[in-house]
Amino acid sequence: MSSQNILLSSTVWRQDHNGFSHQDQGFIDLATNKSPSVTRVYLPPDANTLLVVADECLRSTDCINIIVADKQKHLQFTTMDEAIVHCAKGLGVWRRASNDEGEEPDVVMAPGGDIATQALCLQAIMR
């Protein structure tokens, strides 16, 4: 059976017009309390990862997919090839934002959501 795909088009952090009615942490909390084999939540950080995630969700079967992506312009962090690899892994290290050089890092910055710029700016300051 085709999956149910839910696109939440605003974030709670952007209250400029309808953020709360379009995305509420309670909605994601409720979804993540269900079995991960049935319910999946995606928070793509840029347009290319959004395209890869949407393709995966539209091809999936027998699950509920929730994609959170607002309607604002954002920085483009990945090429399409990088987005495909990143999404296939489920998470990844962005080399341009890392200085671990293959060793154990002292600090791991793991932003979640569609606005990763704050964590990237902090990483730049910490260097």
Image (tube, grey):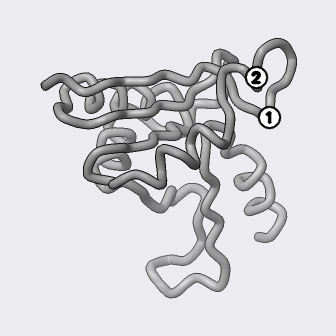
Give the labeled residue for mark 1: 13
Percent across and percent down for residue 81 are: 32, 37
Q: Is residue 39 above or below residue 122?
A: above
Q: Is residue 24 above or below residue 71?
A: below
Give the labeled residue for mark 2: 19
Quadrant of residue 123 in the image?
Answer: bottom right
Question: Where, quadrant-wise, is the C terminus in this rendering?
Answer: bottom right
Q: Upstream in the sequence, badge 2 or badge 1? A: 1
Residue positioned 37% across, 34% down in the render:
65
- Along the viewing direction, whichever of 112 and 106 lies nearer the viewer: 112
- Along the viewing direction, whichever of 127 and 10 lies nearer the viewer: 10
Q: Are marks 2 and 1 in contact (CB under 8 Å)?
A: yes
Quadrant of residue 28 in the image?
Answer: top right
Q: Which mark is residue 57?
A: none
Mark 2 Cα-neighbour bin, 10 Å: few <14, some 14–19, many ≥20 = some
Residue positioned 35% across, 44% down in the render:
39
Looking at the image, residue 6 sits to the left or right of residue 77; the answer is left
Percent across and percent down for residue 80 are: 36, 32
Q: Amino acid at mark 2?
A: Gly
- What is the C-alpha distance between the residues marked 2 and 1? 7 Å
Q: Element at badge 2?
A: helix
Mark 1 Cα-neighbour bin, 10 Å: few <14, some 14–19, many ≥20 = few
Percent across and percent down for residue 19 are: 76, 22
Q: Is residue 14 above or below residue 98?
A: above
- Along the viewing direction, whichever of 26 and 40 lies nearer the viewer: 26
Residue positioned 47% across, 31% down in the render:
67
Percent across and percent down for residue 41 are: 45, 42
Q: Amino acid at mark 1?
A: Trp
Looking at the image, residue 60 sits to the left or right of residue 17; the answer is left
Question: Where, quadrant-wise, is the N terminus in this rendering?
Answer: top left
Residue positioned 78% across, 52% down in the render:
121
